[in-house]
Image (spheres, helix red, strand yellow):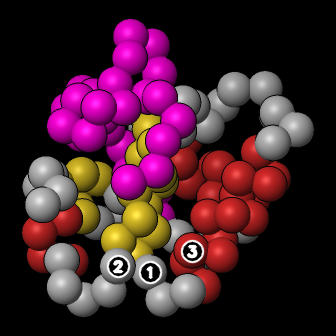
Amino acid sequence: MAPDFTAPSSAGSQVHLQAMVGKAPIVLYFYPKTTLPAAPRRPAVCAMILRFSQAQRHVFGISYDSVESHKKFIEKYHLPFALLSDSDHAIAKLYGANSMLFAKRMTS
């Protein structure tokens, strides 16, 4: 069973994981930071997560960044899924994706 959490979303709402369980498969993608210098892999990673989204799954990207930073990232890369803010690192700790400065890159 996935650890439950509630987090602010780039869509302007709170996402409560337990409320989504059973409706469709859920993909949680932890990533380090939205404002790091553009890496060559970023478009490929976004494309991979997009495929999850198109396959009728609930997809959520999670980092320590603010909701405002996430909104800018979504606009830049035209992402069709929400990003969640884990500013206190609590969600990353629950899933083993925590580290000192950034969340570890992992998918659950």
| Whether residue 56 is situated above or below residue 86 in the rendered picture | below
* Residue 75 picture quarter: bottom right
What amino acid is labelled 3 in the image?
Phe
- Please tell me whether mark 1 sits on a helix, a strand or a loop: loop
Is residue 65 in view from this perspective? no
Query: Marks 2 and 3, Cα distance to the nearest angstrom?
Result: 10 Å
Name the kind of residue labelled 1 in the image: Arg
Is residue 12 rendered to the left or right of residue 46? Answer: left
Marking on residue 25: 2
Label 3 SS: helix
Q: Is residue 58 magenta?
A: no
Q: Which residue is mark 1?
A: 57
> If you read the primary sequence from the N terminus, does the residue marked by circle 2 or circle 1 appear first?
2
Q: Position of residue 48 (x, y in %)?
A: 69, 64
Residue 92 x/y as whole percent: 30, 34
| Image quarter hosting the C terminus | bottom left
- Confirm whether the magenta stretch covers residue 106: yes
Q: How far apart are labels 2 and 1 at the CA level? A: 5 Å
Q: Which part of the image, by quadrant, shows the N terminus? A: bottom left
Query: What is the number of the mark on residue 52?
Result: 3
Q: Is residue 43 visible?
A: yes
- Residue drawn at x 17%, y 57% as measured from the top left: 2
Dot 1 or dot 3, earlier in sequence: 3
Image height check: is 101 above or below 52?
Answer: above
Residue 78, compared with residue 67, is above or below; it is below
- Mark 1 and mark 3 in contact? Answer it, CB < 8 Å: yes
- The earlier-in-sequence mark between 2 and 3 is 2
Give the extent of the magenta segment.
82-108
- Residue 82: x percent and y percent? 46, 64
